[in-house]
């Protein structure tokens, strides 16, 4: 069995509804997550403002 190479030190805080912020390694300040467009509609929420979703970040991280 191999040794652990990396463990991410991430802190996530829920602010209100789907609005969250996360502190990620090698990033200054928190990253915001929320909902927008069709995703907000699907979950039946009306955000105070549209914010990038976690799935947007996952898709970007895997090359689109």
Image: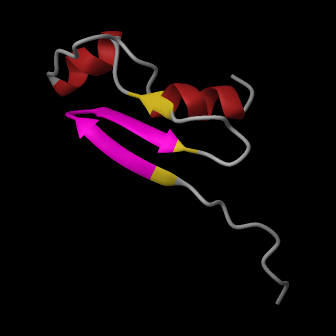
Viewer-nearest residue: 3 or 32: 32
The span picked out in magenta is 12-22
Classified by dominant secondary structure, the portion drawn in magenta counts as: strand
On screen, residue 61 versus residue 21, left or right, reads right
Dividing the picture into quadrants, the one containing residue 63 is top right
55 in magenta: no
Residue sitting at x 36%, y 26%: 34
Residue 35 is left or right of residue 44, and the answer is: right
Q: Residue at x 16, y 21 (%)?
A: 45
The residue at the point 40 percent across, 17 percent down is 51
Residue 49 point in image, percent of width and height: 29, 10
Q: Position of residue 30 (x, y in %)?
A: 52, 36
Most foreground residue, 43 or 9: 9
- In the picture, the quarter occupied by the N terminus is bottom right
Q: Furthest residue to the front?
A: 29
Number of disc labels:
0
* Left or right, 32 with reference to 35: right
Nearer-the-camera pick, 32 or 41: 32
Image quadrant where residue 24 sits: top right
Residue 18 painted magenta: yes
Q: Is residue 60 above or below residue 9?
A: above
Residue 3's place in the image compared with 63, above or below, is below
Residue 42 lies, in percent from the top left, at 23, 22
Instruction: Give the answer, above or below, for where 9 lies relative to 42.
Output: below
**In the rendered view of the protein, which quadrant contains the C terminus?**
top right
Please provide percent x and percent y for residue 12: 43, 49
């Amino acid at each position: 069995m191999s040794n652990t190479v990396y463990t991410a030190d991430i802190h996530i805080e829920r602010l209100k509804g789907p609005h969250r912020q996360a502190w990620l390694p090698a990033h200054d300040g928190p990253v915001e997550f929320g909902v927008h467009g069709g995703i907000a509609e699907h979950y039946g929420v009306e955000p105070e403002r549209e914010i990038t979703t976690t799935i947007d970040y996952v898709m970007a991280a895997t090359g689109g």
